[in-house]
Amino acid sequence: MSATADHNLELRPITEPIYAWNDHGRYVEVVPVQTGWLVLWGEYRDLGLSKHIHGSRVYRDEAGVRRRLADAVLRFTRRDSEARDALVLLDRMGGLPAHRPAELKSPL
């Protein structure tokens, strides 16, 4: 596999989130999908055996992902500092990898 193909998110299967925030059974995950970035937020139940999704949304750019990440963490923790820390962790990992979402199909 060439070096270019290794970094192309479209060519490798994604089985784990690119970014995940966890705190006391609550989580926010970011996964690249064909049309952008899927952000999932929710909580683990039954000692982590099941995953309850509170919400999900696809964003076309990193700015939207960052807003949702901060909002979801703030709703879970009610602490601005926790939302800032989640964004700092994302920045420390170098942000999200390069990803070009596919063009959206025109509505019917």
Image: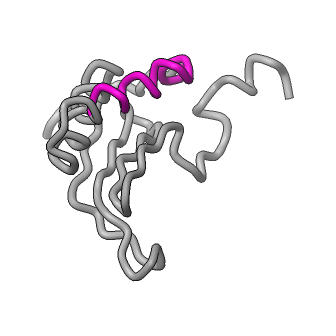
Q: Is residue 97 left or right of residue 58?
A: right
Q: Is residue 82 above or below residue 47?
A: above
Q: Quadrant of residue 61?
A: top left
Please state, as top left, top right, bottom left or bottom right, where the C terminus lies in the image: top left
Residue at left 32%, top 50%?
Answer: 40
* Magenta highlight on residue 21: no
* Residue at the image position 47 percent from the left and 37 percent from the top: 32
- Extreme-bottom residue of the structure: 46
Q: Is residue 67 above or below residue 34?
A: above
Relative side of 1 to 88, left or right: right
Residue 108 appears left or right of 1: left
Residue 42 percent across, percent down from the top left: 29, 59
Considering depth in this image, is 86 or 31 the residue closer to the camera? 86
Q: What residue lies at 46% left-to-right and 44% top-to-bottom?
A: 20
Quadrant in which the N terminus is drawn? top right
User: Which residue occupies the foreground of this view, 25 or 29?
Assistant: 25
Task: Magenta stretch: give its range.
Answer: 83-97
* Residue found 41% across the figure and 22% down from its top: 88
Q: Is residue 60 above or below residue 28?
A: above
Between 45 and 56, the residue placed more toward the observer is: 45
Between 104 and 85, the one nearer to me in the picture = 85
> What x and y, as percent, mark residue 29?
41, 46
Q: Name the magenta segment's main secondary structure.
A: helix
